[in-house]
Amino acid sequence: MTDPAASRPSPAGARVGVLVTNLGTPDAPTPRALRRYLREFLADRRVVDLPRAFWLPLLWGVIAPLRGRRVAQNYRKVWTDEGSPLLAITRRQTAALRRELAARGAGEVAVEFGMRYGEPSIRAALEALRGIERLLILPLYPQYSASTTGSTFDAVAAVLTGWRRIPELRMIADYHDAPGYIDALAASIRAHRGADAHARRLLFSFHGLPRRYVAAGDPYEAQCRTTARLVAHALDLPEAAWTVTFQSRFGREEWLQPYTDATLRALPGQGVKAVDVVCPGFAADCLETLEEIAEQNRAWFLEAGGASFRYLPALNDTPEHIRFLADLVAGHLA
């Protein structure tokens, strides 16, 4: 029996496809939507590797309902007319990348995006790319972790398992030290800090990860610290002017340290009254940057005696970021 999709023409005649992916988002800032999203997200073995018989009943019966109500309130603070910030920005990034590649004469490259959790899904994006001969997977995670990039590979593989014809595959594992990425970050930080940068501590806040994941061989922490070091060097910052921290921990076990919230609470007591916080692990602003950092952590820093707090936005769909992503894609497709 033949696969009807095998002879389907490539999308708009394209032979090459680029799948842009990011973590994902709930469909709405409501407890019901958050419960559904959290159950999909936190059921992933790459994210939480606890025994299923213990973890899944706890997730479905306790964590998703309780956390869903609280997180829904946070999402409402940052929700836009286009949906969640992450969804809106990823959509714009994809469209801009498509235009940039076309302007460079790569109009035969089809570009789609899908979220690891929630909608639009990776499955839907891959179905839109059916018929291509080569597939490049671009997870928008600058630093590799099994819980992000590795999980993306799992999702793509699960879809392609059902395809009769598998395209030639290539996956961008990370770009934590890519010169174009470092240059774009440094330029953005420089522009947003302004003339008083010398009087402010720069905090590089990355998403956290359980310490035991790194002990098991995940390169995430080392790549985060390399990114920060390279950016600090590009900005000509002395070591005393910048700090690396980790945010968004969940549960009671030890995560990567120092923790962002604890650091911001402690800095005023150490004489640091003005900080700028940047999150170089996030390619697009989202709940963890706009609400957790720019609101929650700002409040904690000021309550602890800080005088000035600035959150420096992610690269999002800025021209410099899109040009870098296009360079990255072009290099892998060459």
Image (tube, helix red, strand yellow):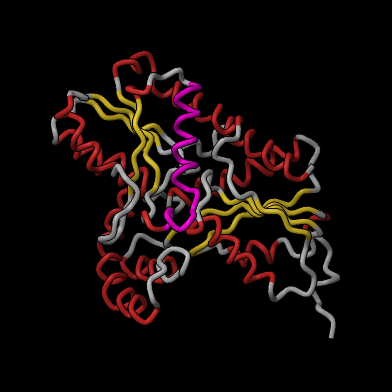
- Residue 206: percent from left, percent from top: 40, 43
Instruction: Write the start and end of the magenta stretch as one range.
Output: 213-234
Q: Is residue 233 magenta?
A: yes
| For residue 31, side relative to residue 146 (left or right) | left
In the rendered image, is residue 114 in sight? yes
Query: Considering the image in quadrants, where does the N terminus appear?
Result: bottom right
Up/down of 100 relative to 119, above or below: above
Q: Quadrant of residue 97?
A: top right
| For residue 283, side relative to residue 249 (left or right) | right
Q: Quadrant of residue 98?
A: top right
- Residue 273: percent from left, percent from top: 20, 24
Residue at left 55%, top 55%? 149
Q: Quadrant of residue 7?
A: bottom right
Residue at left 69%, top 70%? 160
Residue at left 49%, top 25%? 186
Q: Give the main secondary structure of the magenta stretch.
A: helix
In the rendered image, is residue 23 in sight? no
| For residue 222, side relative to residue 51 (left or right) | right
Q: Is residue 250 magenta?
A: no
Query: Considering the image in quadrants, where does the C terminus appear?
Result: top right
- Residue 133: percent from left, percent from top: 81, 59
Residue at left 54%, top 30%? 182
Up/down of 245 relative to 121, above or below: above
